[in-house]
């Protein structure tokens, strides 16, 4: 006689709903946007079908429509033309930049919306690295951190809700937290890209913001995909240094890391379902191998089940109707 029949709990949609453990809701998501200067501009991104570079006015329209559907957080990534970039990322500190205008405009029009900015220098440097380069040809840690802190203060002055340092320099969370405190922005959260692997999955993103590397790679600052203990160390340090939310990036190849961090830390975890994760599925759908919407829904559910509290994904418009 079979006493245990787990299939009983799967016998109907109603019973399955009663025992479902994980749910996706609009509140779980951060919508990413690629921003370009100008008005009424919408550019396709070759490696990210269905995702566009948009001018502020069009981003505002999209955000308003998302907001009505329950999405209350967005992340902004500027894409600059190459003549605006230099070795020192000077454009990152321009007060009249399209990014600063976008933060101000969105916060004015939709004050309840949570606006998040990525803090790193790669969209602004000619070489595409996340910081300034020293005499040894390496990204200079402390000098870069000083610029990142200024960048965070600039965004805070524009009204940003959360700054998200994505550079992987040492000590940047403490420095940023202290800068924000001193400048009277204690309410600005730091969403730290604490665990950012040196992944090959960022290529479509670099195509989107035009930040392809002119030399070297990012292995001197981003984590080795082979390492998990090192991820725990990064999470611990960023927590001690004053991070409010920890990010794990990419997401699907690193579900074990998300699960470990969930055990170690009491902080919320955000997972970044990155550009390559999106592009692979879109390419497979184009070939007729898979249905993108189904794969995205299952992927995001898995990321949440692994322990993420919130997620950034380019797939949001594709799964919104299922939430
Ligand atoms: C910049 C940054 C990157 C991504 C987010 N912020 C690229 C990189 O580090 O090269 C990648 C996101 C994605 O692939 O979707 N530091």
Image (cartoon, rainbow, N blue to C red):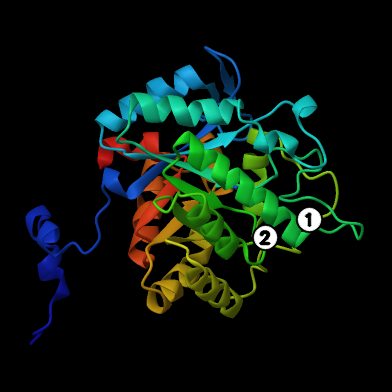
In-image side of 115 versus 203 (left or right): left
Is residue 218 shown to the viewer in this render? Answer: no
Q: Nearer the viewer, residue 239 or 213?
A: 239
Q: Is residue 297 above or below residue 318?
A: below
Query: In the rendered image, which quarter contains the N terminus?
Result: bottom left
In the visual, does 138 lie left or right of 232?
A: right
Circle number at residue 103: none
Residue 318: x and y in percent read: 38, 35
Q: Which residue is tagged 2?
A: 198
What residue occupies the far top of the structure in this picture? 40
Find residue 65 and report its image quarter: top left
Tell me residue 62's x, y (percent). 39, 24
- Above or below, comparing residue 302 to residue 183 in the picture: below
Residue occupying image coordinates x 64% and y 68%: 225
Give the labeled residue for mark 1: 217
Label 1 Cα crowd, 10 Å radius (few <14 / some 14-19 / many 20+) = few
Instruction: Decide which of tag 2 and tag 1 comes sooner along the chain.
Output: 2
Q: Residue at x 56, y 46 (%)?
A: 152
* Circle 2/circle 1 CB separation < 8 Å: yes
The answer to whether mark 1 is within 8 Å of ligand 1 is: no
């Amino acid at each position: 006689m079979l006493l245990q029949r787990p299939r009983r709990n799967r016998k109907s949609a109603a019973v399955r709903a009663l025992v479902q453990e994980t749910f996706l809701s609009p509140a779980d998501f951060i919508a990413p946007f690629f921003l370009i200067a100008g008005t009424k501009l919408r550019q396709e991104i070759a490696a990210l079908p269905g995702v566009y570079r948009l001018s502020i006015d069009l981003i505002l329209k999209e955000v308003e429509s998302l907001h009505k559907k329950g999405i209350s957080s967005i992340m902004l990534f500027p894409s600059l033309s190459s003549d605006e970039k230099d070795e020192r990322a000077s454009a990152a500190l321009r007060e009249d930049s399209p990014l600063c205008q976008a933060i101000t405009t969105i916060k004015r029009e939709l004050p309840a919306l949570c606006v998040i900015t990525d803090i790193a220098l790669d969209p602004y440097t000619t070489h595409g690295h996340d910081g300034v380069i020293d005499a040894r040809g390496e990204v200079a840690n402390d000098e870069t951190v000083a610029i990142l802190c200024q960048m965070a203060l600039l965004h805070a002055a524009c009204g940003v809700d959360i700054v998200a340092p994505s550079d992987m320099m040492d000590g940047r969370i403490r420095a940023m937290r202290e800068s924000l405190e001193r400048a009277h922005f204690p309410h600005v959260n730091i969403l730290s890209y604490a665990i950012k692997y040196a992944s090959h999955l960022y290529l479509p993103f670099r195509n989107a913001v035009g930040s392809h590397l002119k030399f070297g790679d990012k292995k001197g600052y981003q984590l080795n995909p082979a390492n998990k203990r090192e991820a725990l160390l990064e999470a611990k340090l960023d927590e001690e240094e004053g991070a409010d939310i920890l990010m794990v990036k990419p997401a699907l190849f690193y579900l074990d890391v998300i699960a470990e961090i969930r055990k170690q830390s009491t902080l919320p975890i955000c997972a970044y379902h990155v550009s390559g994760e999106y592009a692979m599925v879109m390419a497979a759908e184009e070939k007729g191998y898979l249905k993108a919407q189904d794969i995205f829904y299952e992927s995001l559910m898995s990321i949440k089940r692994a322990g993420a509290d919130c997620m950034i994904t380019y797939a949001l418009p594709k799964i919104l109707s299922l939430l």
